């Protein structure tokens, strides 16, 4: 029993399409994995806890909107370890459906800011730039302000 004459299994086009299909599948899997990773871990960040989705040290606080509402940023506090002795590592990121999360500002926030007894020291300059204050050190220190310009 051999291959029947004219069957699709013996045609050269079928054999040539298989490697292309395999390559397309590999590329799709790599891009899907990268996109899923960026759904949870922001690009450009300095530190993100490994296994954050399991241990839940990441606290999503909410949105930060520019005065005109065109720019929406998101605020996250890292609770791992900081709840006992240190200031909280804070990440401000933006979200895009295609590329996921991108960190725009990071630094330490004091306990009163984390627990919402004091407001986050942020001042919008325009729709695409703001000043943000972070505690200068992991433990205690003065608030240092940075100006962030979004692209």
Image (cartoon, rainbow, N blue to C red):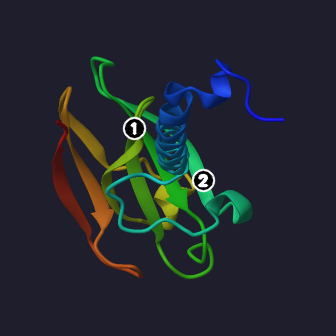
Pointer 1 local density, CA inside 10 Å: few below 14, some 14–19, many at least 20 = some
In primary-sequence order, the first of circles 1 and 2 is 2
Q: Is residue 63 left or right of residue 135?
A: right
Q: Residue at x 33, y 19 (%)?
A: 69
Residue 66 appears at what percent x and percent y? Answer: 30, 27
In the picture shown, does residue 60 fall above or below 90? above
Residue 102 appears at what percent x and percent y? Answer: 36, 46
Q: Residue furthest right?
A: 1
Q: Residue at x 50, y 79 (%)?
A: 86
Q: Residue at x 56, y 82 (%)?
A: 85
Give residue 16's mark.
none
Residue 29 found in image quarter: top right
Residue 54 appears at what percent x and percent y? Answer: 72, 62
Q: Residue at x 37, y 80 (%)?
A: 140
Find disc 2 in the rendering and name its residue.
Answer: 59
Pointer 2 local density, CA inside 10 Å: few below 14, some 14–19, many at least 20 = some
In the picture shown, does residue 136 fall above or below 94? below
Q: CA distance from mark 1 to mark 2?
A: 21 Å
In the picture shown, does residue 146 fall above or below 2? below
Q: Is residue 105 left or right of residue 23?
A: left
Q: Is residue 138 left or right of residue 51?
A: left
Find disc 1 in the rendering and name its residue.
Answer: 99
Rendered-image quadrant of the N terminus: top right
In the picture shown, does residue 85 fall above or below 131? below
Residue in front for this viewpoint, 70 or 100: 100
Rendered-image quadrant of the C terminus: top left
Label 1 sits on a secondary structure element that is loop
Residue 10 appears at what percent x and percent y? Answer: 62, 30
Residue in front for this viewpoint, 38 or 112: 38
């Amino acid at each position: 029993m051999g291959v029947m004459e004219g069957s699709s299994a013996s045609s050269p086009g079928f054999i040539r399409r298989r490697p292309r299909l395999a390559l397309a599948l590999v590329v799709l899997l790599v891009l899907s994995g990268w996109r899923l990773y960026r759904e949870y871990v922001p690009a450009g960040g300095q530190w993100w806890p490994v296994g954050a989705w399991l241990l839940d040290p990441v606290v999503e606080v909410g949105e930060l909107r520019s005065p005109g509402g065109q720019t929406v940023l998101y605020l996250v506090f890292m609770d791992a370890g900081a709840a006992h002795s240190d200031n909280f590592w804070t990440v401000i990121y933006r979200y895009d459906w295609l590329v996921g999360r991108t960190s725009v500002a990071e630094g330490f926030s004091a306990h009163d800011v984390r627990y919402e007894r004091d407001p986050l020291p942020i001042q919008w300059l325009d729709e695409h730039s703001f000043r943000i204050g972070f505690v200068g050190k992991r433990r205690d220190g003065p608030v240092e302000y940075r100006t962030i310009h979004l692209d």
